[in-house]
Image: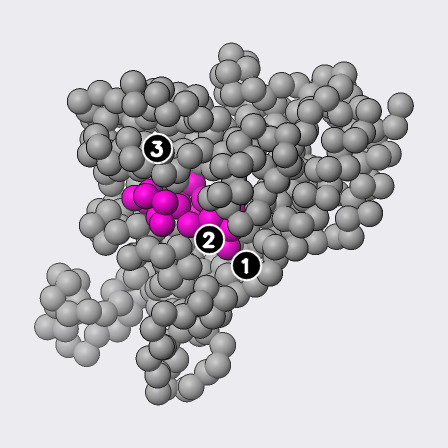
Amino acid sequence: MNRPLPSELHPDTLAVRAGTERTQFREHGEAMYLTSSFVFGSAAQAAACFSGEEEGYVYARFSNPTVTAMQTRLAALEGGEDCIATASGMSAILSLAMATMQAGDHVVASNGLFGATQQLFGGILSKFGITTTFVPATDLDAWRAAITPRTRLFFTETPSNPLTEVIDIAGVAAIARAAGVIFAVDNCFCTPALQRPLELGADVVVHSATKYLDGQGRVLGGAVVGSKAITDEVFKFLRTAGPTLSPFNAWVILKGLETLRIRMEAQSASALELARWLEAQPGIARVYYPGLESHPQHALAMRQQKSGGAIVSFDVKGGRDAAWKVVDATRLISITANLGDTKSTITHPATTTHGRISAEARATAGIGDGLLRIAVGLEDIDDLKADLARGLAG
């Protein structure tokens, strides 16, 4: 029998308990429903479930108990009314855009977005008559000035990928609210363990659950969290278009959420130590990490985040050749563009994550040829320093 959870539970408890619905077998671990469809007792019941007159699972493209459990848990952690899970982080952003806009509408987005997100807004959506203006992320006047009568969506990520720019969520939210515009924040780098954008005034949070929500580099997934009014529209798109999260992936992410806060705290602590060490290295021109006092938005980050997060980026003196030397000299850190894993990763953004956008766009975003991004994992910090020191040696 399912006992109702007490109200007002703390986040650590929600991460372990929210969304759990036991079956008649009284299992302790969450069940995984690997089924494409669901059976009805009669034609009338099937009709009622398909029409929405009766609650019930219908078809796994848009309804599955394991996916529901993951959605419920993430919504609870973000403090959102509802959540819709998707096949990937990019499909979450696409689903939000398609659900809330139409041809002729306009987006205002920060100019330091992840490369694929820039391509989605600046390229793919433009084919369908949706235009985007990219603005400096930290310039509130630029957000305000970019609004047109057809602006429907503000979109940003904070901290940004890969330069860890921190956006004033409450400030941008106030501008969006005054203009009647939906404000969405990609919370991938911080997760609800470190930052809750909805509490700061955002309307929507999107996630690449592939990253820290899973936490071990195992599966792809995405999510849109917000009010029921918004998620209902996202659900309509997902039901028809089908960018669906599989039950297996939902189950893996569901289990990842249980250790989210512990992992984020440990990885953030190591990232801060690594960032301070990198600042002292003669081969490094600049380190980008919100937890450092040298970061231009350090004070803001410490107000709206619980820590600096686990992403450290830095410019290597000597450009691409010197940066590639650091990458190629590693023996421990994984050379891969994914992040959020328990294993530390390193990538050269200009030729990987942001390699498909123009050189001009990279320059505008501040992504130079000497830039490297490290997603700090759970290895011993001294081993990570030694692995980087090899390539930084003169």
- Disc 1 element: helix
- Whole-angstrom CA distance, mark 2 to mark 3, is 19 Å
Do the numbered discs 3 and 1 sit on residues whose CB atoms are within 8 Å?
Answer: no
Neighbor class of circle 1 (other Cα within 10 Å; few <14, some 14-19, many 20+) is many
Mark carried by residue 172: 3
Residue drawn at point x = 36 percent, y = 20 percent: 142
Left or right: where does residue 366 sit relative to residue 35? right
Q: Is residue 317 left or right of residue 118?
A: right
Query: Do the residues under discs 2 and 1 have CB atoms within 8 angstroms?
Result: yes
Q: Position of residue 75 (x, y in %)?
A: 36, 58
Quadrant position of residue 97:
top left
Question: Which three-letter amino acid code belongs to the residue tagged 1?
Answer: Leu
Please determine whether, in this image, residue 83 is positioned above or below residue 90.
below
For the N terminus, which image quadrant? bottom left
> Residue at (32%, 43%) from the top-left corner?
201
Looking at the image, is mark 2 or mark 3 earlier in the sequence? 3
Residue 273 located left or right of residue 124:
right
**Given the image, on which type of amino acid does mark 2 rest?**
Pro
- Depth check, front residue: 227 or 241: 227
Q: Which residues are magenta?
A: 186-209
**Residue at the spot of label 2:** 192
